[in-house]
Amino acid sequence: MTTAHRADTPTDPSISVVVPVYRSEDLLDTLVATVTRALDTAGHHNKYEIILVNDASPDGSWQVILRLAKEHTYVRGISLRRNFGQHNAVMAGLNHARGRIIIVMDDDMQHPSQALQDMIQAIETGNDVCYTRYRNRQHAGWKKLGSRFNGWVAGYLLHKPAGLYMSSFKALSRSLVDEITAHKGPYVYLDGLILDLTRSIASIDVEHMKRPQGCSNYNLTKLISLWLRMATGFSVLPLRLSCLAGVFFFIMSLLLMGVIIIQKLLHPETPAGWSSLASILLFSSGFQLFFIGLVGEYLGRTYMNLNGKPQFSIGRTTWDSSRPPTDDDAAVSANAISSDAP
């Protein structure tokens, strides 16, 4: 589907807003309206684009995106062939964003559009990235605890600056996005890439809005998967910890054997402790299996990377879904399969 250019079509937008979309057909109209109003009020009329990335949403989100792209020529839609996850969907949007400032926000209306201008100004003053820190977080208690744990681990694994909250609502500079999209791995952890590349980071406080309807698409399994991406994708510290743990248990076993031998020599009548022995064996075996699985996680991700597992696969776009694929599509992102087939 090719739309005719209107007078307000941004041919060279300075701002791109990338939104991963999943189960949000009832929220997209309001989302686009609030973002449009905020950017127009801030004086960016005809200078921005909104990229909506449909992550194989099972509802009618893609149909809504198609309609919005017809009604507003600054709205651009991408539909992925299958669900790749939030961070991979964001990468698909970043690969097609044309602005010199790129803003990433969620589709659940919990990120206030009123903060967009402050984020833009933070990048214009020379920062590579501007994170947002939520006031009055509306997340469930278990998710807050998970975020705290994730932040604590990121401080050790990624050397995250103290006090930085790695929110999904952030603004990035063009130069930083160009380096991020050069990443070819299939397991994307956007904040890990950012912290690997820069320490030019700003942070602003924003109000965390209440979700108008529905609930978060993140569950405990997805959060653990995201944590594993961070732990195994950007640090070898877990492997080093396993080595240190192995040395520790080896020394402890030597000490324990010495104690047992001495005790047996001093008290020959002492009965053998089969229950304690079984407990030790079970503990050590479980410990070994855990770290064998950790090594397997590293090897599996390496294998998938070498095997060319794609970050995302684009099925359709709103700006030109009628033409066959060309070499230019592959050049947009060497780590994605892009065919633009209807």
Image (cartoon, helix red, strand yellow):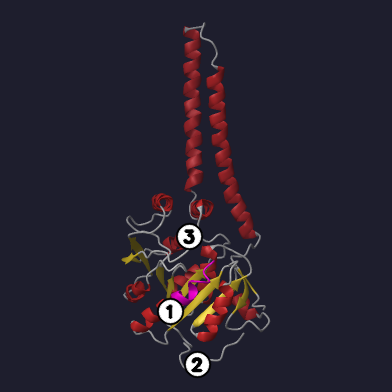
Q: For the residue carrying disc 1, how many other residues have a C-alpha within 10 Å: few (<14), some (14-19), or many (20+)? A: few
Up-down relation of residue 308 to residue 11 (above or below): above
* Structural distance between the alpha carbons of marks 2 and 1: 18 Å
Residue 28 colored magenta?
yes
Q: Position of residue 234 (x, y in %)?
A: 49, 55
Is residue 116 among the parts visible in the rendering?
A: yes
Left or right, 136 with respect to 22, comes to left
Front-lying residue, 38 or 49? 38
Can residue 182 be seen? no
Q: Which residue is mark 1?
A: 33
Q: Is residue 337 left or right of residue 37?
A: right
Give above or below for 66 relative to 278.
Answer: below
Determine which quarter of the picture holds residue 81: bottom right
Extreme residue toward the bottom, this view:
7
Q: CA distance from mark 3 to mark 1?
A: 22 Å
Tell me the residue that label 3 is attached to: 216
Mark closer to the chain start, 2 or 1: 2
> Depth check: 133 or 139 in front?
139
Residue 61 percent across, percent down from the top left:
56, 72
Q: According to the image, label 2 marks what residue?
A: 6
**Quadrant of the image occupied by residue 105:** bottom left
For the residue marked with disc 2, what is the amino acid? Arg
Q: Dot 3: few (<14), some (14–19), or many (≥20) neighbours within 10 Å?
A: few
The part of the image, by quadrant, that contains residue 48 is bottom left
Q: Report the residue at 51% width, 9% height from top.
A: 270
Range of residues picked out in magenta: 23-31
Q: Quadrant of the N terminus?
A: bottom right
